[in-house]
Image (cartoon, rainbow, N blue to C red):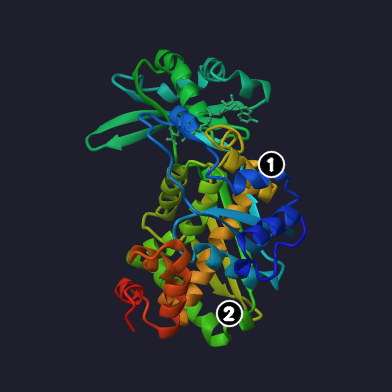
C-alpha cells in the first residue's frame, strides 16, 4: 500500500476520497462500488441474516488515515455514527507516526468452551476427565470437519470447580483452536458434541454447553511513543499521565476512558463484520480481571521524556465465519486494510484503540473535549433542527464561527434569524 497519510483527505469531496483510497489500497472498481454503495446488502441478505427483517439501517463508513502498524502503512475503515471518532483516530495515528507508529501483536486464536456439570459428579471428576480426554476431544472435533481438515479444533480439556454459595459446580472447559474464525458457533457445536462423553466421564449432568466470550489467549496489544513536542510539551505529557492515573484507580473515570478506546475498536469491528457485543463483553471483563474495573490502556513517561502508551485487549475476531466473510462491505473493508488473517485485523484494532485513547485524553487535558467534538457534531445538530443535508454544512459553519453550536441556534439560523 502507498502511504496511509493522504494529504487533506478530510477536505476532499467523495469522488476524490474514493480515488485516493482506490490508489492507496490498490482496490479494484468492484471494491469501490461496494464501499460507496448503499451499505453492501439488500433486503434479501438482511432477511437471511435476522428474523422478522423489514429493511436495513445505514451507518456512516469512513477511513482513518495516518496509521502505521508494525511498520506497515494501513488505511482503516471505521463504521460509526459518532462524530469525531474517525478524526480522533487519524490524529492519534499522525501523532504516533514520528516514532514509527504502532507495534502490535495478537495472541493465538483460542476460545474456551464451557460444559457445565451439575448433579452428582464423581469426587475425582478431574482425573476421570483427564483419562477420557481422547474420547472427549474426539467427540468435540467430530463437530467440525473443516477445522479438523485444517489441523485446528479442540486441543485440550480441563476442569474447574466453581463455588456457588454453599454448593459447587463443575465446569469442564475445552481449549479450542478456531483458526481464522471468531469461533463462537464452532466452539458451541464442539461443547454440545462433547457433552455426552463428559457426562459419561464425570457421572454428572451436562447443563449449559457454550463458549465463554472471555478469551484471554486472544489478547491483542499495541504500544506507541508520542514525542513530548507532539503531545504539547513536558507539562502536557505529565498531565496525560495524571489523566491515566485517574482512569487506573477510579471506576467512574475508567469506564469512560475505556468507552473512548472502544469507540475506535468497535468502529473497525463493525466495518469488518465482527461480533461487536462479544468484543465489548470481553474487553470489559478484561478491564476487571484484576478484581477491580480499571483502564485497558497504560501511559507513562519514558526515559526521554516522551509519552509511552500501551493497550491490551482481548479481540476475538475472524476473517471467516459470521458475516465477516460474506458481507460485501466487510470483505471490502478487510481488503482496504489488507487484513487477510485475524491477527492482522486484531493488531490494527488494538492500534486504533490506542490512537483513539491518546486523542481523547489529549483533548481532555488541553482544550477540553467539547471544542472539537461540537465542531464536528454541528452538522448533526443542523440536520436535527431541520436543515436539508445540502444546507447543513453552511449552517454548521456559521454556528462554529459564532461559537454557538446548538440545535436552538441552528433553528434560528434556518428561520432566517440573526
Ligand atoms: P461460523 O460458524 O459462521 O464459521 C466458522 C466455521 O467456518 C468453522 O466451524 C469452519 O467450519 C469454517 N471455516 C472455514 N474456513 C475456516 C478457517 N480457515 N478457519 C476457521 N474456520 C473455518 O462462525 P464462528 O466464527 O464459529 O462464530 C461466529 C458467529 O457466531 C458470529 O456471527 C457470532 O455473532 C455468532 N455467535 C456468537 C455467540 C457468542 O459470542 N456468545 C453465540 C452464538 C453465536
Q: Is residue 208 above or below residue 402?
A: above
Front residue of this view, candidates 138 and 193: 193
**Residue highlighted by disc 1:** 30
**Quarter of the figure with the C terminus:** bottom left
Front residue of this view, candidates 331 and 353: 331
Q: Is residue 358 above or below residue 258?
A: below
Query: Mark 2 to mark 1: distance in Å?
Result: 40 Å
- At x 37%, y 67%, the residue is 381
Callout 1: helix, strand or loop? helix
Image coordinates of residue 212 in percent, x first then y, are 43, 36
- At x 48%, y 41%, the residue is 275
Q: What number of labels is visible? A: 2
- At x 58%, y 32%, the residue is 178
Image coordinates of residue 282 in percent, x first then y, are 45, 46
Q: Is residue 70 visible?
A: no
Q: Residues within 10 Å of mark 2 (few under 14, many from 20)?
A: many
Image coordinates of residue 302 in percent, x first then y, are 62, 76
**Residue highlighted by disc 2:** 231
Front residue of this view, candidates 154 and 54: 54
Residue reaching furthest to the left: 166
Image-based side of 203 in relation to 309, left or right: left
Give residue 251's mark.
none
Front residue of this view, candidates 88 and 254: 88
Amino acid at each position: 500500500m502507498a502511504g496511509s497519510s493522504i494529504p487533506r483527505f478530510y477536505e476532499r469531496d467523495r469522488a476524490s476520497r474514493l480515488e485516493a483510497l482506490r490508489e492507496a489500497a490498490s482496490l479494484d472498481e468492484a471494491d469501490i462500488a461496494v464501499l460507496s454503495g448503499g451499505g453492501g446488502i439488500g433486503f434479501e441478505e438482511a432477511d437471511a441474516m435476522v428474523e422478522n427483517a423489514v429493511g436495513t439501517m445505514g451507518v456512516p463508513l469512513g477511513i482513518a488515515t495516518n496509521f502505521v502498524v508494525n511498520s506497515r502503512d494501513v488505511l482503516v475503515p471505521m463504521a460509526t455514527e459518532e462524530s469525531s471518532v474517525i478524526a480522533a483516530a487519524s490524529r492519534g495515528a499522525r501523532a504516533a507516526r514520528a516514532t514509527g507508529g504502532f507495534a502490535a501483536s495478537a495472541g493465538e486464536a483460542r476460545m474456551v468452551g464451557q460444559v457445565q456439570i451439575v448433579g452428582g459428579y464423581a469426587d475425582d471428576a478431574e482425573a476421570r476427565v483427564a483419562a477420557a480426554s481422547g474420547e472427549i476431544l474426539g467427540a468435540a472435533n467430530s463437530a467440525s470437519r473443516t477445522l479438523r481438515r485444517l489441523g485446528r479444533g479442540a486441543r485440550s480439556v480441563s476442569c474447574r470447580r466453581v463455588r456457588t454459595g454453599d454448593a459447587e459446580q463443575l465446569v469442564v472447559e475445552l481449549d479450542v483452536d478456531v483458526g481464522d474464525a471468531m469461533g463462537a458457533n464452532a466452539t458451541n457445536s464442539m461443547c454440545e458434541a462433547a457433552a455426552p462423553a463428559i457426562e459419561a466421564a464425570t457421572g454428572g449432568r451436562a447443563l449449559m454447553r457454550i463458549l465463554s466470550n472471555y478469551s484471554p489467549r486472544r489478547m491483542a496489544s499495541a504500544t506507541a511513543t508520542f514525542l513530548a513536542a507532539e503531545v504539547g510539551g513536558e507539562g502536557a505529557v505529565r498531565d496525560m499521565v495524571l489523566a491515566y492515573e485517574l482512569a487506573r484507580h477510579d471506576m467512574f473515570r475508567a469506564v469512560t476512558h475505556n468507552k473512548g478506546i472502544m469507540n475506535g475498536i468497535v468502529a473497525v469491528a463493525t466495518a469488518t463484520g465482527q461480533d461487536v457485543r462479544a468484543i465489548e463483553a470481553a474487553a470489559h471483563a478484561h478491564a476487571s480481571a484484576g478484581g477491580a474495573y480499571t483502564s485497558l490502556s497504560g501511559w507513562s513517561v519514558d526515559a526521554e521524556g516522551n509519552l509511552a502508551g500501551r493497550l491490551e485487549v482481548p479481540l476475538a475476531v475472524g476473517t471467516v465465519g459470521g458475516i465477516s466473510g460474506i458481507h460485501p462491505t466487510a470483505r471490502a473493508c478487510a481488503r482496504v486494510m489488507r487484513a487477510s488473517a485475524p491477527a492482522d485485523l486484531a493488531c490494527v484494532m488494538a492500534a486504533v484503540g490506542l490512537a483513539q485513547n491518546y486523542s481523547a485524553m489529549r483533548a481532555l487535558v488541553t482544550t477540553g473535549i467539547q471544542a472539537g467534538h461540537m465542531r464536528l457534531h454541528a452538522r448533526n445538530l443542523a440536520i436535527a433542527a431541520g436543515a436539508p443535508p445540502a444546507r447543513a454544512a453552511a449552517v454548521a459553519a456559521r454556528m462554529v464561527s459564532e461559537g454557538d453550536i446548538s440545535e436552538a441556534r441552528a433553528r434560528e439560523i434556518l428561520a432566517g434569524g440573526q
